Amino acid sequence: MSNHLSCDNVQNLLPLYVEGLLTEETWEEVREHLAECPACSRIHKQMSVPEPVLEEEAPRVDYFKKVRNSRIKAILTALVSVVLIAAALLVAFKLKSDREAAELARSLAETPVVSYDEAARVLVITGTGNYDQSDLTGTPNNAASLEVQDDNFHLTADLHLLRTWEAAPLEMLPDYLERADRSLAFLRSYLVEHAPGTKAAEQAEKYVELSICSLHSASWRSEENRIVIELAHYYRHIDVLYALAMMNPGKVEWQHLAYAWNFSICLDENGWFRSNLNELDTEVSPQIPYAEAYLRAGGTKEPTAENVRLSSDAVAWYNLTNGMDWDGAATEIMPICDWDLYTGSKNAPGAKDMSLCMGISLLNYLSDRYGFDKVSVWCFGERSFEEAFGVDYETARADWAHWLEETFQE
């Protein structure tokens, strides 16, 4: 790009840019950046005008028709408040530059704006991150729906459904939104860093539309400029469904599920489904027959990414040695083809004879040996297995099994 402003700089300056409070030189730099950067331009447009209604989303948008004006007012009120406070502090403390003013304005706006439309019974939250600082205790318990506008995602939810799954939905919402924001940000940055130039990194740039408005099975699709996910009863699996949505396979095979769950279990520290390592003690429980091998290989109780991955490898070794007919967790003993999200052929390689932990272990082995970008290229359908790794599947699986035996042998 022609000027020296980064995307973070520009996004911090956008409130002042919208209100015309920047110096002429900085205003021109932001304008040039917006002309060249689709991501920042999209955020600028969201601040300036109501987002367009897509014809195919008519039923969902109509559901929130009564609160659209409330949402716009909340956003505008938040922006005006931030700008006025920033302008006052700019004078009081004699800040030296527009960038310092924007940084201060951003810090003042860290806590999301929470409003409630009593007539429509809709809870509206506007902000980005720091949701755990939000106080929802004053919100009426008869709130029927939720709308959240975040830089990383837009979420709509039926609070009646959430009440069937959680004892106190308004109390758990800040933590849920904070985890969702951090997980999506993590997955995006991880793909861009570790799979540059691939379809995975390209998909990670898209905006995310989420909804929890149905009890039906989860669904997802990747569109030109956004990822659309119906979380349904899988709402806590947001990172898993996000990865599946980015891959958007015609049929979900074992590698797609393993790739998605690898983020949630092994990589993303914000995920809900990381392995419980506290039970892997030196006094091996009959319910955890792989614990001794895990500890022998150097595993500890610390919930690090390395330990979580090692526990999946230990499960995979035990599965290969003793099968999956034992009293373990679903990820440890259930064939991948038995998962609700699996839609591929049950006769496909890895469908019946592989658990999710085994799939995660195999993908991590391939990633270590050939590179995470190669794994992404294969899982996102850009190349076949042999084209991606230069070896056939059966040979790679045999090499992985041999590596597990060497790692966990007595």
Image: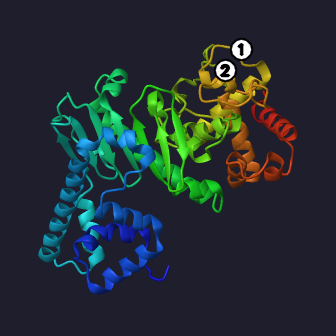
For label 2, count other residues whose C-alpha is less than 10 Å away and answer few (under 14), some (14-19) or many (20+): many
Query: Residue at 29% across / 38% down in the picture?
Result: 146
Residue beneath the point at 41% across and 52% down: 152
The image position of residue 195, as x and y in percent, is: 64, 57
* Residue designated by label 2: 333
Q: Is 186 located above or below residue 21 in the figure?
A: above
Residue 310: quadrant of the picture: top right
User: Residue 52, located in which quarter of the rendered image?
Assistant: bottom left
Tell me the SS state at disc 2.
helix
Image disc number at residue 399: none
Q: Amino acid at mark 1?
A: Asp
Q: Nearer the viewer, residue 310 or 28?
A: 28
Q: Could you tell me how far apart the alpha carbons at marks 2 and 1 are, in whole angstroms? A: 7 Å
Name the spot of residue 316 as percent of width and height, x first: 71, 29
- What residue is shown with label 1? 325
Query: On screen, 356 above or below 2?
Result: above
Question: At which x and y percent is residue 82?
Answer: 20, 63
Say left or right for 86 vs 13. Answer: left
Q: Mark 2 touching mark 1, by CB under 8 A?
A: yes
